[in-house]
Image (cartoon, rainbow, N blue to C red):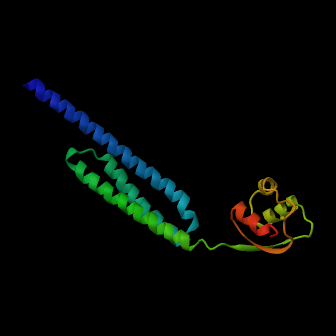
Amino acid sequence: MSGNKNKKFVFWLIGFGCGMILSGVIILVLVLNTNVYQQETIKHLSNDEQKKIIEQLNIIQSKLSQSATQNDQNTSEKQLDETIQMSEKILEVEDITKELAQEEKTPIYVAVYIPVNATANKICDILQQAGVISDAKSFSDYIKIHKKTKHLRSGKIELPIDETYEVLLDILTIK
């Protein structure tokens, strides 16, 4: 009979250990995701908005770290509930941040002058100097791949900064 109790205790102990490991992994993933999210998403926000979101994420991360270091058996359900609540707060912060980022994605336009009979390479150099594109060579290659080198406009053109090559080529192409 005592052997049966020992087996139950050992299985319970193994199950408890696996549960603790799993909850630790979940908390670790949440903490790492908030770090990546923090670095990638807040670039598009104003300084005040960035500070508010960073403060909220730091509070959530510190709570997650604290709950990850506590291994008391009696508080494991409480920790799970707190983790779920913190995850919901993270999702709320993500939603708010996405909304703010969408509101601030008004494109900035730059007026450039493209000379008559300018080559694709020359146009790409002009666009790079104006800050419309970051790499003249890759955009030039993109134009050549799409066989539009002979169909590019000249004159004064307003182009958005940080737009995709597809959109830029569509604007630059004679229709």
Camera-nearest residue between 40 and 166: 166
* Relative height, residue 10 to residue 78 (above, below): above
Farthest right residue?
117
* Direction from residue 74 to residue 171 in the image, left or right: right
Residue 107 visible at all: yes
**Residue 118 found in image quarter:** bottom right
Farthest left residue?
1
Q: Residue at x 80, y 67 (%)?
A: 173
User: Residue 58 location, x and y as percent?
Assistant: 43, 59
Image quarter (top left, top right, bottom left or bottom right) of the N terminus: top left
* Relative height, residue 8 to residue 135 (above, below): above
User: Residue 2 location, x and y as percent?
Assistant: 8, 25
Residue 55 visible at all: no
* Direction from residue 1 to residue 17 in the image, left or right: right
* Relative height, residue 39 to residue 9 (above, below): below
Camera-nearest residue between 14 and 31: 14
* Direction from residue 168 to residue 8 in the image, left or right: left
Q: Residue at x 45, y 63 (%)?
A: 94
User: Residue 30 location, x and y as percent?
Assistant: 41, 52
Q: Residue at x 47, y 63 (%)?
A: 54
Count of residue discs: 0
User: Residue 138 location, x and y as percent?
Assistant: 77, 53
Image quarter (top left, top right, bottom left or bottom right) of the C terminus: bottom right
